[in-house]
Amino acid sequence: METLIAILIIVFAVLQLVLFFKLWIATDDIRKIREMVAGKPNPMSPDLLKDVDEELFLGNKGKAVEILKRAQYELEYSLKKTDNAYKSADMNVRLDVIKAQLKKLSE
């Protein structure tokens, strides 16, 4: 009987450790998501070009170019990491639109 209790305690301790590390990893993921959402524009967002137009309307051409360059960087980086052909096709179309906007602003 004592051996059974000892085995159960050991199993419980191992499960506690596994749970601890799973929560730790999940916390790191949340931190990365929060940093991504708070600091960088989503390059696939339909509001991206609206934000650029708004900055241009307000006379902030530099800010509009910065938004587009950040989105271009994010898309190019994501394209390097993705294996999904459908997703990369959408990203390439969006990247072409962003490059056209940057070219138009640089003229």
Image: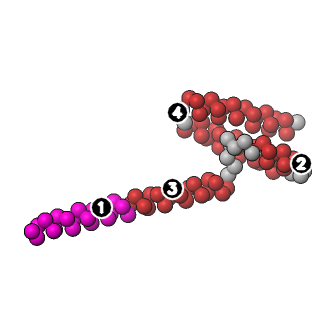
Mark pair 3, 4: CA separation: 21 Å
Q: Compare residues 73 and 8 and report the one nearer the observer.
A: 8
What residue would you read off at disc 2? 57
What residue would you read off at disc 3? 29
* Residue 48 screen position, x and y as percent: 74, 44
- Residue found 75% across the figure and 45% down from its top: 47
- Residue found 33% across the figure and 59% down from its top: 18
The secondary element bearing badge 3 is classed as helix
Query: Which kind of residue does numbered mark 3 sit on?
Result: Asp
Q: In which quarter of the image is the N terminus?
A: bottom left
- Mark 4 or 1, nearer chain start: 1
> Where residue 15 is drawn, which disc sits there?
1
Q: In this view, does 85 lie above or below 53?
A: above
- Mark 3 or 4, nearer chain start: 3
- Mark 2 or 3, nearer chain start: 3
The secondary element bearing badge 1 is classed as helix
Q: Does the magenta stretch include residue 103?
A: no
Query: Which kind of residue does numbered mark 1 sit on?
Result: Leu
- Residue found 78% across the figure and 42% down from its top: 49
The crowding category of the residue bearing disc 1, from other C-alpha atoms within 10 Å (few below 14, some 14 to 19, many at least 20), is few
Which residue, as the protein is rendered here, is positioned at the far front?
A: 1
